[in-house]
Amino acid sequence: MARLNNKRIVLGITGGIAAYKSATLLRLLRQEGADVQVICTEQASSFIGIKTLAALSGKGVLLEFSDAETGAWNNHVALGSESDLLLIAPLTAQSMAKMAQGFCDNLLSAVYLSARCPVMIAPAMDLDMYAHPAVQRNVQHLRSDGCQLIGPEYGALASGMTGLGRMSEPEAILEAVCAHFNQASKHLKGRHVMISAGPTYEAIDPVRFISNHSSGKMGYALAEVCASLGAAVTLISGPVHLPCPAGVQRIMVKSAAEMHEACMSHRATQDFLFMAAAVADFTPAQPADGKIKKHQAPDHLILKPTRDILADLGAEKSPGQTLIGFALETEEGTEQALDKLKRKNCDFLVLNSLQHQGAGFGGDTNQVSIFAKDGSRKELPLASKTEIAQSIVEWICLNS
Ligand code: CTP
């Protein structure tokens, strides 16, 4: 499984000799599935070919605030706020000083100042420069501003000397980036996770039922991801045609009432509760004991509401439990999502909109928004249900 699927990374390259290694780093990030936008400073472009970087990233390299040929504006605020990570490798002493002081004289420094995402920096310079108190002050400054440092390493330097200042190897930078995104495994290892999935069948008589189009794929993908991160997973599943993911304890149920009962009896020991099932809201009030014959066709069916499992879990939530609801709306459902989040006492609510092509029932892809009770929100672009499940789990773990 590629480790950086769905991740949008801005790779900033500044003007030092180590910039030649940024091409390898870019290739490694792409191989792990990341979408990478390269930004070079003017100096960097004399150390590494722009065409090489464009070919490896599969998109144009950004150099200036506006494109020299077309005049198109490179929106630094959007670049800094819509990415998942700003990675600057190599970071020279000069660019480091600008960042520490808040200078904004090129596209990369403007992106840095407007970045809302985490920032990782891989400094590269000669040993005496790196040891200088001014540079060390800047390093501390950037650290306290929230930048995560990768390296530098001790070793042979371009000057011919040996010492501390060499940029970390691209493979080591890649591992640091993957470890950053894989925080979810720290949160889930050994924790208890309950997931509901699939539709429910509401009996009209012993052979007929009311149901919906849920395939269970989203809930099963969540179960697979949580189990692969070391959680003890209990999957409460309505009737679906999917195999039980490895290492998962599965409890099969049919009706909303059975799902309610299974969820309530397993809830107490759980740390995370993902309620992805499409539970029927109504059930026949009096299902017939025997098959209803054609000539006995009732002219109406009386329905009664089912119990809302999510709301009941929310009402009895214990401290430390994280409750995640799901909602499928046919309209642009932000308001309904926020209302459900509050009304059912959830910590997070994942919204699918049937308006998006490729999102929702049955298919292998999905596109969702996640709302947190603290008001933060995350949009996940269209991706496979497994990738969406990975991103949901990761974002929730990092924000809970
Ligand atoms: N849900 C539940 N029990 C029910 C109905 C829904 O636990 N009887 C859960 C679903 O598993 C999902 C969430 O509630 O996590 C939202 O489901 P949805 O059908 O969108 O919400 P409703 O409250 O039923 O609102 P409405 O149908 O009016 O949009």
Image (tube, rainbow, N blue to C red):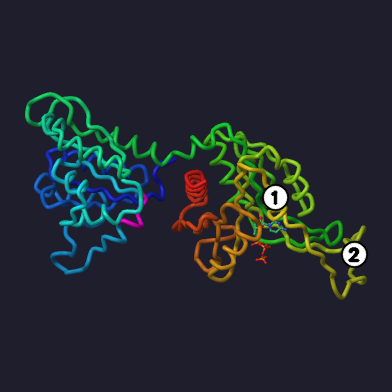
Which residue is nearer to you in this view: 19 or 138? 138
User: Quick one: label 2, few (<14), some, or many (20+) residues within 10 Å?
Assistant: some
Q: Position of residue 291 (x, y in %)?
A: 90, 61
Magenta segment's dominant SS is helix
Is the CB of mark 2 within 8 Å of ligand 1? no
Q: Quick check: 186 left or right of 46?
A: right
Q: Is residue 168 left or right of residue 2?
A: left
Residue 48, quarter of picture: top left
Q: Which residue is mark 1?
A: 313
Q: In the image, what residue type sits under mark 1?
A: Leu
Q: Which residue is mark 2?
A: 292
- Element under disc 2: loop
Q: Where the N terminus falls, by quadrant? A: top left
Point 17% across, 31% down: residue: 165
Real-space CA distance between mark 2 and mark 1, rounded to the nearest whole angstrom: 36 Å
Question: Three-letter amino acid code at disc 2?
Answer: Ile
The residue sitting at 35% across, 47% down in the picture is 118
Is residue 375 rendered magenta in the image?
A: no
Closer to the camera in the image, 101 or 55: 101
* Closer mark to the observer between disc 2 and disc 1: 1
> Does mark 1 have its CB less than 8 Å from ligand 1?
yes
Q: Position of residue 107 (x, y in %)?
A: 20, 57
What residue is rendered at 89% in x and 62% in y? 286
